[in-house]
Amino acid sequence: MRFARPQGWLVLSVTLIAMAAASVWAVGGSVTSTVSAPAVLTHGQGSYLLQSPVSGQVTAVLARPGQRLAADAPVLKVRTAKGETVVRTVDAGRVSALAATVGQIIATGANVASVEKVAHAGDPLYATVYVPAENAAAIPAHASVDLTVQSVPTQQYGVLHGEVKSVDRSAQSAQTIGAFLGDSALGEQFTEDGRPVAVTVRLATSKSTKSGYAWSSADGPPFELTSMTLASGSIRLADQRPVDWLLP
């Protein structure tokens, strides 16, 4: 009979120990993964596109970007064949963009302004992350989220912290996204690779930062955040056991 050399027994023992450790980790361990997707900072109720109910020539612009208006407030005056018509807001909010200028000829149904539905100046911001539909089911309640804000240098101020507030289980079209954000171009941008699912993220607040929100750095940026700021969100998915990858 040939007996293995001591070196052979050592190699076999190390191999068996490694296999046993891997088996324990595969059953009892967990692997954390994330999904990254484009995002935008908004107030909770979104925005709407204000459309002209008439066609004609714009004779006056009565609102300005950033102005907060009540419902039914005047935004434009349009001269028509039947006289002058005032285009008014549908809901109260803040004018985020104006698409009409004095002297411009507009048609019925033309987008003349984007109005964000925000009732009070102190209303908090949320982040809406547009996640690929195939990843939506793996997002757990209250999952942690890190947001890289486009207007904030990440190396200097870090990322913005938040947690998942809700997950919309239905995929959204470019028209739906554009209507919510008040920007049809963003609707087209966020659906380039298919219809995504909207994930609403509640931002973590902090009394010690200028922005009022919690960052991975101590102070965050030395300025306040504004709505309609683009970002990229990294959402932590539910932990998985390695053995689940091997099972059908």
Image (spheres, helix red, strand yellow):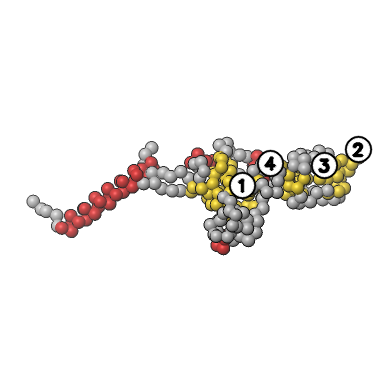
Q: CA distance from mark 1 to mark 2?
A: 44 Å
For the point 63% across and 58% down, the residue is: 210
User: Can residue 165 be seen from the camera position used here?
Assistant: yes
Q: Which residue position holds label 2?
A: 82
Quadrant location of residue 175? top right
Secondary structure type for disc 4: helix
**From what the image shows, is residue 129 above or below residue 211?**
above
Counting residues from the start of the chain, the first of labels 2 and 4 encountered is 2
Q: Which mark is residue 126?
A: 1
- Which kind of residue does numbered mark 3 sit on? Val
Q: How many marks?
A: 4
Q: Residues within 10 Å of mark 4 (few under 14, many from 20)?
A: some
Comparing marks 1 and 2, which lies closer to the viewer?
A: 1
Q: Please name which of the two marks, 1 or 4, marks the residue nearer to the observer.
A: 1
10 Å neighbourhood of mark 3: few (<14), some, or many (≥20)?
many
> Alpha-carbon distance for marks 1 and 4?
17 Å
Q: Earlier in the sequence, mark 3 or mark 2?
A: 2
- Say what secondary structure mark 2 lies in: loop
Image point (65%, 39%), residue name: 176
| Residue closer to the observer: 52 or 165 | 165
**View extreme (left): residue:** 1
Could you tell me the amino acid type at mark 4?
Ala
Q: Are marks 1 and 4 in contact (CB under 8 Å)?
A: no
Comes first in the chain, label 1 or label 2: 2
Mark 3 lies on residue:
87
Q: CA distance from mark 4 to mark 3?
A: 19 Å
Of the two numbered discs 1 and 3 in the rendering, the one whose residue sits closer to the viewer:
1
Residue carrying label 4: 179
Report if residue 150 is visible in the image: no
Cα gap from disc 3 to disc 2, whole angstroms: 15 Å
